[in-house]
Image: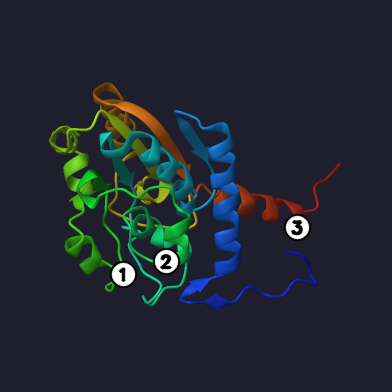
Amino acid sequence: MTEDSPEPEIEKGIYARNVVISQLHAALGILQEADPERVTTLGGECSVSVAPFSHLAAKYGDDLAVVWLDAHPDCTLPESDYDGYHAMAISHLTGHGDPEVLDALPATIDPSRVALAGLHAWAEDELPNVHNWGLKTFAPQVLNQGADSLLAWFKTTGCSKLAIHLDVDVIDSADVVFGLGMEPQGLTRDAVTKTIAALQSSADVVGLTVAEYVPRQVLALQDLLTSIEFPV
């Protein structure tokens, strides 16, 4: 956005909705042309998983499950209090939300094949969606002890393919802060690596996203150093 560009507005409950839909179509166009069997996505906020996971859902159908490693459920709707599309990622992937966004998606994923792993922070108006849609949740306290329960859930789906979304804010902010948000009482770094390794040994991982990494400490240090006059 240039200095002369208008500030994006909230439309139909979604901030910068026109930009969101335009970028979604662009991403889906790239995926349609390349038609990959596996997709790795690095960077961006949580909505970056919508296009690739929908592409994989169209390719693999009921044989695809999703594990969403995130402090938050990302289950808000356009009518919710918060208007950020990134918090609606799971909503749209499971067939809920803005009709124009849903019409653009090549496929959605049944909530019975989606697990919210490491969930420990949410808005009051999105938590009912988690329960009403039948999404399975796994608390950090459980996964920090091992991934057995998550692996058992995956087995019940009957799927062989898996897409994993990792929002780095699922990691306990008392351990390390990788993103903008700081959420305490999350997963340890060790639990994250062991959970993903366990999933990779039990499923054919066809999608992997690492989202919301912002090196805030590095940026802050850069700002600090630029204000210091060093002797030469």
Q: Is residue 18 left or right of residue 40?
A: right
Quadrant containing the C terminus in the rendered view: top right
- Earlier in the chain: of badge 1 and badge 3, it is 1
Residue at screen point 18% across, 50% down: 136
Q: Is residue 96 left or right of residue 214?
A: left
Query: Where's residue 221, x and y in %?
Result: 63, 50
Marks 1,3: beta carbons within 8 A: no
Residue position for label 3: 227
Q: Amino acid at mark 3?
A: Ser
| In the foreground, 215 or 28 | 28
Residue position for label 2: 99
Marks 2,1: beta carbons within 8 A: no
- Helix, strand or loop under label 2: helix
As drawn, which residue projects farthest toward the right?
232
**Which numbered circle lies on residue 91?**
none
Quadrant containing the N terminus in the rendered view: bottom right
| In the foreground, 226 or 190 | 190
- Helix, strand or loop under label 3: loop
Residue position for label 1: 123
Residue at screen point 27% across, 73% down: 124
Query: Where's residue 209, x and y in %?
Result: 45, 40
Query: Where's residue 159, x and y in %?
Result: 22, 32
